[in-house]
Image (cartoon, rainbow, N blue to C red):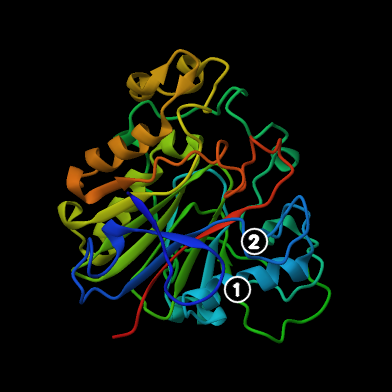
Amino acid sequence: MRLAEDSSGEGPPRYAFDLLTPGRGLDAGVRVRHAVFTRRGGVGAPPFDSLNVSASVGDEPAAVDRNRDLALAALGRPRAGLVMAGLVHGTTVARVTTESLRRGKGQPLPNPLPVHDKRGDPDRYDAALHGEPDRPGHPARPLPWLVRATPPIATEASGPHALPMRPSGDDEPRTLDRGHVVLDVDALVTDDPDVTLLITAADCAQVFVVDPRRPAVGLAHAGWRGTAAGVLTATVEAMGRHFGSDPAELRAAVGPCLGPCCAQFSDPHRELPAWCAPFIHGDHVDLWAMNRQQLLEAGLRPEHVAVAEVCTVCNRDLYFSHRGDRGRTGRFAAVIALVQG
C-alpha cells in the first residue's frame, strides 16, 4: 500500500507514505513528519464537514482556525511555525525560514476574524476571482510546450526578490502568531525544523519531496495547470539551488487527487501542451502518471517516487472534491515538516 493510515498519537484521521516515513522508506535517523489529512475529524458544518482548513470557501473562520490547530497538534507541530502557500496554479517556489518570516517576507495568517481581502487566503484561486471555472473543461491558459522551457522559478523568500506581501485587511490588529502565508506561490521548500509546510487541496495533487541527506523538505500544489506548466520540475530545481539536493537522492510522493477515471477534459489535446499527449486517453487525462513522469524527468529514481492512486472524486467520504461536490466544498490538508534532533 502506498498510503498507510497514521495511527501514531491522537487527532484527526490521516495517512502517510511508507516511502517518506523514517524506519520504513527512510532511514530511522531522518527526522521528518508528514501527513495527508482526510475531511474527517474536524469541527466544520456541511458542506465543509468537517476538517476544512481553507478560509476562502465560505466556512466559518473560527472553524477553519480550529481545524488547523487540530491538524498541527496531531503531528506535534506548533502553530507559530505554520506556513501556507497562496495558490495560483503556477510554478513559483518559495524557500521559507523562521528568519525570513521574522523579516516580514510572509503575511501573517489572521486570527479567526472575517476575511476582507481574498489575497490573504492560502488557496484564493477560484472561478469568481479569475472569471473562469476552475475545471478542466475550460480552455487552459497558454502554457509552455516543454516543461524544461519554463522560466526561472525559484524565489528566495528571504532574499531581495521575494514575493510581495500585503496586509490581509483585517479590521483588528493581530495579537496571536497563527502562522504565515506566502502569496502567489504553489510550492514551498525549507530546511528549517521550526517551519511546518501546509498545502490545501480538493482534487489537486499535493506532492511531498524529501531530501534525506540535507535534510530538507518541499511541498507542491499540482493542479492540472501547474503540472502541465512544470511545477514539480520547478520544485526539484529549487531544492537543488537552495540546498544542493541531488535529484537522484530525493524522495517524492503524490497524494490523493483527481484520478484518470474522473479527469475528464473537453478537448485535452487543445487544452494541454504537447508533452502531455502520452497521458491523454480519449477525453480523460492520467494526472497521476503525468506527475510521476515529471518527477522522473527531473532526475528522481523510479523507486523513489510513490503515487497514492486515490481519486478524490471517487472517495468523497474521505476527501473534499471540488469537482465531485460541484465547487461547494472544503479543502483538506497536506503537511510536512522536519523535526528537531
Q: Kindly state the secondary structure of the residue where label 1 is placed.
A: helix
Q: Residues within 10 Å of mark 2 (few under 14, many from 20)?
A: many
Is 170 left, or right, of 188 in this rendering? right
Work out whether 79 lies above or below 227. Answer: below
Q: Which residue is mark 2?
A: 51
Measured as percent of width and height from the top left, residue 232 is found at 36, 45
Q: Is any part of residue 118 visible from this angle?
A: yes
Q: Which residue is mark 1?
A: 70
So how many labels did they put on this image? 2
Which residue is at 33% across, 84% downward? Answer: 340
Is 38 left, or right, of 149 in this rendering? right
Measured as percent of width and height from the top left, residue 111 is found at 73, 76
Give the residue type that dot 2 points to: Leu
Which residue is at 64% across, 35% downward? Answer: 324
- Give the image quarter of residue 294: top left
Give the residue type that dot 1 points to: Leu
Mark 1–mark 2 CB contact (< 8 Å): yes
Measured as percent of width and height from the top left, residue 117 is found at 76, 59
Q: Kindly state the secondary structure of the residue where label 2 is placed.
A: loop
Work out whether 59 lies above or below 73. Answer: above
Q: Residues within 10 Å of mark 1 (few under 14, many from 20)?
A: many
Precedes in sequence: disc 1 or disc 2 = 2
Q: Nearer the viewer, residue 77 or 118?
A: 77
Cα distance between the residues tagged 1 and 2: 9 Å
Please give the label number shown on residue 112: none
